[in-house]
Image: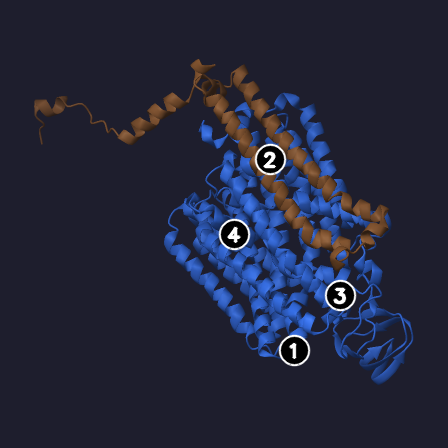
Chain colours: A brown, B blue
């Protein structure tokens, strides 16, 4: 089968998907200079990232300390002050009440607090990085 | 109990439903990605229920209540620690680990530290921990079938192994996500509904004292069949009906025993009159020691070791991490973990009630050593030979079977995943199927050989090994740029290796006594700090070998998902 001269000169077809174009345009608009600095790991980007990691780790450690004191202190407390272990609020012995029931809502509350902190930190970081460069 | 005609159908139904959902998954699972990570199409709610379903194993369903029945308030640290492990996972690991894109722990090692050797070492530990954790699941299945139907121990273990291996090999992860989400709700129902009836019965019974500091008593005349040689101590003289051999002489009839220590030979049956005190048995706590904290074996050291192992061990369990990859991004992984913490915490409110009620209504279990069966025995022990009693007993048995099936599925998937990608093949669907079969046969064999080990003891040891190997690796790997492959390997070998040795010594029963015994039996308190110290020390000494890519990896782990870098 021989192809005519006109057909041979046709350039290869390029598929254009409008959605892809829109996404690229959005990305270009969204990613300011700061985003580029993060991605290229410039000194500024590196300092920003270190700040983020330190902030997240500080949240995590602070909440872990709450659990270490709140729950981890109990065996010591019961050993040092046996009268506390013998107390019976609500008719249930205190150690049973604390470890059998109260520990679970406590753990959940600490977890919920961390999720809130972590999400807020990330949102602030994203805002900072994505702020258009000319506004600064 | 062997007269419960509902129990066997209930167990069979749970097994069949599991297989049916697995087959449905087989129709849906087409690609390797479907097999391993459910194509990441699992919604957070389903995923959280599946994680909960996978996590609540035989140790949670049967073991926790058994431990509380036997040793009292100090054992509450087990369920608290099992739940708190998810908090540690949430605080330090969940989000960054999901963003890393690692599917297994060996993947994470290679991605973060670019070392093939460390990858192999991690794979070896994943398989060791996975098998160690699979053994008690199969033991529990054997025990359940033996208790509710009177069938042989080996049969239950074999059924669970066969169903789970077949299901995992055929359906992969997509199938087990649905299976496990279903099984979480089944397990919660199977503990919470019967306990409501039991509490109502206890109310109607005139609320007998649950935590009598002077020790528990038999409420009705109770005949105890002792299958093994049993030593017990009486606090007061007692008149007993005995058939068998007691204190080296054979007895058949009524005898008066003096206060003090007595030994019954295997096969002896002893009938205690109503109102008599339950004799003390070595290894079980009694009276005030059961009721008040810190008086049990090991004291403060054991308590803190247990806390450290369970709080930090969860993040190192192989089947827990695999699940995080099915979340769409880091923020979703964090939210899923929080939901799991809620689901798991809700579940753990119930085993305590079984343990405490067992103290009143089934104290003979402490004497026979079958404390792990308390959840299964209690409905019929309290409600007697009634339809309600049988139905609730069947529900509990079905829940227990769901616990073994789901935990074993998750463990087997992760062990098989590691075996198929790092040991025997390249991770194709075919390799995965072969690996699943290999991964199932080994723990089944182990479960048939060692049937006497306490379910929760083995699980506690698996947590100790995970806490002293993978916990420092993950935490330092995610938060500290200075970690080197050499440091990580040295830390895993020192901490994890020491904990693994302690496990082997405990399993063969060579723990010794006094301080050295406590160090071997509760290793986490020294192996976890050791692993962290060695990892940091060796990393600092090999500072020049910090991977070149560390800044890029850190960016990937910690940059918010919204940036889409």
Which comes before the other along the chain, label 2 or label 3? 2
Horizontally, residue A57 falls left or right of residue B214, namely left
Q: Quadrant of residue B24?
A: bottom left
The residue singled out by tag 3 in the image is B210
- Front position in the image: B48 or B100: B48
Q: Chain of mark 4?
A: B
Asked if badges 2 and 4 are on one and the same chain, I answer: yes
Give the SS element for disc 1: loop
In this view, the mark in front (4 or 3): 3
The residue singled out by tag 4 in the image is B49
Q: Which mark is residue B384?
A: 1
Give the SS element for disc 2: helix
- Front position in the image: B435 or B10: B10
The residue singled out by tag 2 in the image is B118
Give the SS element for disc 3: loop
Asked if badges 1 and 3 are on one and the same chain, I answer: yes
Q: Residue at x 44, y 59 (%)?
A: B21
Q: Residue at x 74, y 37 (%)?
A: B529
């Amino acid at each position: 089968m021989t192809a005519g001269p006109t057909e041979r000169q046709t350039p290869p077809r390029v598929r254009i998907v409008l959605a892809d174009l829109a996404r690229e345009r959005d990305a270009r608009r969204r990613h300011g200079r700061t985003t580029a600095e993060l991605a290229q790991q410039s000194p500024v980007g590196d300092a920003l990232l270190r700040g983020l990691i330190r902030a997240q780790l500080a949240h995590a450690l602070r909440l872990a300390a709450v659990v270490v004191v709140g729950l981890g202190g109990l065996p010591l407390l019961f050993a040092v002050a046996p009268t506390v272990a013998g107390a019976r609020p609500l008719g249930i012995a205190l150690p049973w009440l604390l470890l059998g029931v109260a520990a679970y809502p406590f753990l959940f509350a600490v977890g919920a607090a961390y999720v809130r902190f972590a999400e807020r930190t990330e949102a602030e970081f994203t805002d900072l990085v994505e702020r258009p460069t000319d506004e600064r | 109990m062997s007269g419960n005609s509902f129990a066997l159908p209930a167990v069979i139904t749970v097994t069949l439903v599991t297989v049916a959902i697995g087959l449905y998954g087989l129709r849906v699972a087409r690609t390797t990605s479907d097999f391993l990570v459910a194509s990441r199409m699992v919604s957070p709610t389903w995923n959280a229920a599946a994680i909960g379903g996978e996590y609540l194993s035989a140790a949670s369903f049967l073991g926790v209540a058994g431990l509380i029945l036997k040793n009292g308030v100090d054992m509450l640290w087990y369920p608290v620690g099992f739940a708190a492990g998810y908090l540690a996972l949430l605080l330090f690991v969940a989000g960054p680990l999901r963003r890393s894109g690692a599917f297994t722990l060996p993947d994470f090692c290679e991605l973060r530290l670019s070392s093939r050797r460390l990858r192999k070492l991690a794979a070896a530990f994943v398989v060791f921990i996975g098998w160690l954790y699979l053994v008690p699941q199969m033991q529990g299945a054997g025990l359940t079938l033996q208790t509710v139907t009177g069938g042989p121990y080996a049969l239950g273990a074999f059924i669970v192994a066969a169903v789970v291996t077949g299901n995992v090999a055929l359906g992969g992860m997509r199938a087990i996500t649905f299976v496990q989400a279903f099984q979480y709700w089944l397990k919660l129902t199977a503990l919470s509904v019967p306990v409501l009836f039991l509490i109502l019965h206890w109310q109607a019974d005139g609320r007998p004292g649950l935590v009598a500091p002077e020790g528990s008593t038999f409420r009705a005349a109770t005949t105890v069949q002792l299958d093994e040689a049993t030593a017990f101590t009486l606090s007061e003289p007692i008149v007993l009906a005995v058939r068998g051999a007691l204190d080296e002489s054979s007895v058949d009839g009524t005898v008066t025993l003096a206060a003090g220590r007595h030994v019954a030979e295997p096969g002896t049956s002893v009938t205690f009159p109503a109102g008599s005190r339950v004799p003390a048995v070595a290894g079980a706590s009694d009276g005030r020691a059961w009721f008040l904290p810190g008086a049990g074996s090991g004291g403060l050291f054991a308590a803190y070791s247990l806390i450290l192992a369970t709080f930090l061990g969860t993040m190192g369990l192989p089947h827990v991490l695999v699940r995080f990859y099915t979340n769409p991004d880091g923020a979703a992984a964090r939210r899923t973990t929080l939901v799991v913490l809620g689901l798991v915490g809700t579940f753990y409110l119930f085993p305590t009630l079984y343990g405490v009620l067992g103290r009143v209504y089934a104290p003979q279990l402490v004497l026979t050593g079958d404390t792990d069966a308390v959840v299964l025995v209690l409905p019929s022990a309290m409600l007697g030979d009634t339809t309600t009693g049988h139905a609730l007993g069947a529900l509990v048995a079905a829940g227990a079977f769901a616990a073994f099936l789901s935990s074993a599925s998750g463990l087997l998937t992760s062990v098989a995943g590691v075996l198929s990608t790092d040991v025997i093949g390249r991770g194709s669907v075919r390799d995965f199927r072969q690996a699943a079969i290999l991964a199932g046969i080994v723990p089944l064999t182990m479960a048939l050989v060692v049937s006497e080990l306490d379910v929760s003891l083995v699980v506690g040891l698996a947590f100790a090994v995970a806490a002293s190997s993978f916990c420092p690796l993950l935490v330092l790997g995610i938060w500290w740029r200075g970690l080197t492959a050499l440091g990580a390997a040295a830390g895993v070998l020192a901490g994890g290796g020491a904990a693994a040795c302690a496990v082997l010594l405990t399993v063969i029963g060579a723990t010794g006594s006094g301080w050295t015994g406590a160090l071997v039996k509760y290793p986490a308190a020294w192996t976890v700090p050791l692993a962290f110290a060695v990892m940091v020390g060796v990393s600092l000494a090999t500072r020049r070998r910090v991977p070149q890519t560390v800044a890029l990896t850190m960016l990937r782990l910690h940059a918010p998902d919204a940036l889409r870098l």
